[in-house]
Image (cartoon, grey):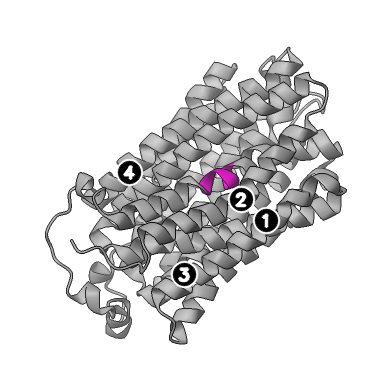
């Protein structure tokens, strides 16, 4: 039953990232629809729309982390997806960059509930030795969603258009919003906590609750502000703050990079989709493999601390070669970016799991919310830097040096984050609450 629950989380994360990526795929189309008449202002104005989503996400993930710990995963997750599903649909009715910004705010608020709810669900349904693998599996939905979007969205907007010169871009948002609400029906019909799931066997229930510290957990309520007094919280905070922005950069700017450097056009579906399909296929392997690696090391007798950090160090090193992307042609660049993106997802599967390694189940969503908020703030700052830098270099006549600097920042982020994580949590000891 726990793997059925994991499948639900996987599909939720898949539609979450389809929603999130539609805006970057449709950017070339929306430049015309939103009347971005000044070519030099396109990157800056687009970055503001992305920042609206990121700012709302940063606020919402903190709120939803607390809210889900308070009301439970079933209700909290349901409310989250209703908000993001309706917000996704609302994009279809936007007619200006301001309208898109408002819709993105709603989407950011709604989507912010996904990871606090999913990580808490994994903590409720899996023992520690399986949590990284389960997290890697559901988190691979981010890659599958990002992989499906460049295939499905361009096909849909042109297939339903009366005139190929004016694609029916609204269908992209209507489609993903419908998938969100469809998933909600399955969630409400299937999900229960282990203690309330009548079809759950006693053997599986005992296995889920086999961690000794969970058997001895206190029922005392944990105040949100109290969590900020623990070094473990700050380890997770910086692990997310210094790395999440890299994934957001790939998600929102990669189609533009491929267009600017390699002249990949959305109208040529095969050439537009194939590089993104390859990159996000890599990330699916990285997400599941990253979760499997540390889980396997724990199973053969390694400590949780040693297993998680060894895996995170390996993935931090795998990102470094992306600095060479400026020197190569399209397909070697796709491979380098694919490896780096896969390494990010391997890192992500492990950093997310450290929240449930170091905190009791009742605090996991709140801690995840704090870390995800930190990641969103890092993403917000980097989106602003990206828009500013690319607009500046584009005005000078050569946008490529701007991309090179941004990829260089991405390459060094993970090793820096791991050093800070280790400094705040040298042994990853459980927080004594």
Label whose residue precedes the other's in the sequence (4 or 1): 4
Q: Position of residue 160 (x, y in %)?
A: 73, 34
Instruction: Place residue 306 in its image quadrant.
Output: bottom left
Distance, label 4 to label 3, CA atoms, is 26 Å
Q: Secondary structure at mark 2?
A: helix
Look at the image and say whether residue 246 sits in the magenta stretch.
yes
Q: Position of residue 393 (x, y in %)?
A: 75, 25
Numbered tag placed on residue 64 in the rendering: 4
Front in this rendered view, residue 321 or 12? 321
Q: Secondary structure at mark 1?
A: helix
Mark 2 surroundings: few (<14), some (14-19) or many (≥20) residues within 10 A: some
Q: Secondary structure at mark 4?
A: helix
Q: Are marks 3 and 2 in contact (CB under 8 Å)?
A: no
**Which label sits in the foreground, 4 or 2?**
2
Label whose residue precedes the other's in the sequence (3 or 2): 3
Q: Are marks 2 and 1 in contact (CB under 8 Å)?
A: yes
Decide if residue 291 is on the left or right side of residue 156: left
Q: Are marks 4 and 3 in contact (CB under 8 Å)?
A: no
**Which label sits in the foreground, 4 or 1?**
1
Q: Position of residue 281 (x, y in %)?
A: 69, 60
Quadrant where the C terminus sits is bottom left
Distance, label 4 to label 2, CA atoms, is 30 Å
Q: Is residue 168 above or below residue 148?
A: above
Residue corresponding to mark 1 = 320
**Which label sits in the foreground, 3 or 2?**
2
Distance, label 2 to label 1, CA atoms, is 7 Å
Distance, label 3 to label 1, CA atoms, is 19 Å
Residue corresponding to mark 2 = 412
Residue corresponding to mark 3 = 308
Label whose residue precedes the other's in the sequence (3 or 1): 3
* Residue found at x 17% / y 74%: 216
Q: Which residues are magenta?
A: 243-248
């Amino acid at each position: 039953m726990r793997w059925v629950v994991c499948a639900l989380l996987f599909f939720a994360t898949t539609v979450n990232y389809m929603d999130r990526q539609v805006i970057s795929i449709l950017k070339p189309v929306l430049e015309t629809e939103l009347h971005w008449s000044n070519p030099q202002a396109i990157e800056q104005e687009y970055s503001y729309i992305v920042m609206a989503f990121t700012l709302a996400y940063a606020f919402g993930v903190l709120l939803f982390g607390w809210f889900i710990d308070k009301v439970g995963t079933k209700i909290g997750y349901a409310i989250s997806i209703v908000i993001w599903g309706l917000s996704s649909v609302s994009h279809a009715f936007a007619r200006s960059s301001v309208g898109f910004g408002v819709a993105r705010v709603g989407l950011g608020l709604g989507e912010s509930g996904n990871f606090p709810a999913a990580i808490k669900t994994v903590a409720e349904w899996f023992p520690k030795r399986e949590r990284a693998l389960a997290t890697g599996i559901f988190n691979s939905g981010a890659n599958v969603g990002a992989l499906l979007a460049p295939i499905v969205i361009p096909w849909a907007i042109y297939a339903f258009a009366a005139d190929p010169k004016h694609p029916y871009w609204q269908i992209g948002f209507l489609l993903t919003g419908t998938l969100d609400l469809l998933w909600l029906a399955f969630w409400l019909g299937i999900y229960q906590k282990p203690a309330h799931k009548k079809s759950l066997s006693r053997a599986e229930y005992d296995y889920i609750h086999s961690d000794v510290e969970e058997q001895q957990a206190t029922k005392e309520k944990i105040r949100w502000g109290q969590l900020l007094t623990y070094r473990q919280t700050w380890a997770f905070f910086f692990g997310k703050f210094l790395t999440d922005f890299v994934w957001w950069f790939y998600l929102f700017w990669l189609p533009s990079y491929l267009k600017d450097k390699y002249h990949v056009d959305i109208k040529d579906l095969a050439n537009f989709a194939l590089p993104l399909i390859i990159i996000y296929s890599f990330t699916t392997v990285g997400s599941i493999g990253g979760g499997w690696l540390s889980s396997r090391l724990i199973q053969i007798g390694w400590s949780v601390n040693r297993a998680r950090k060894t895996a995170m160090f390996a993935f931090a090193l795998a990102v470094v070669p992306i600095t060479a992307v400026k020197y190569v042609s399209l397909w070697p660049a796709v491979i380098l970016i694919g490896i780096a993106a896969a390494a990010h997802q391997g890192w992500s599967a492990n950093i997310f799991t450290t929240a449930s390694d170091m905190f009791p189940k009742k605090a996991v969503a709140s801690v995840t919310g704090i870390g995800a908020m930190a990641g969103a703030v890092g993403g917000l700052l980097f989106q602003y830097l990206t828009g500013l830098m690319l607009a500046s270099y584009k005005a000078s006549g050569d946008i490529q040096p701007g991309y090179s600097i941004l990829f260089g920042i991405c390459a060094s982020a993970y090793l820096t984050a791991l050093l800070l994580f280790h400094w705040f949590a040298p042994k990853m000891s459980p927080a004594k609450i």
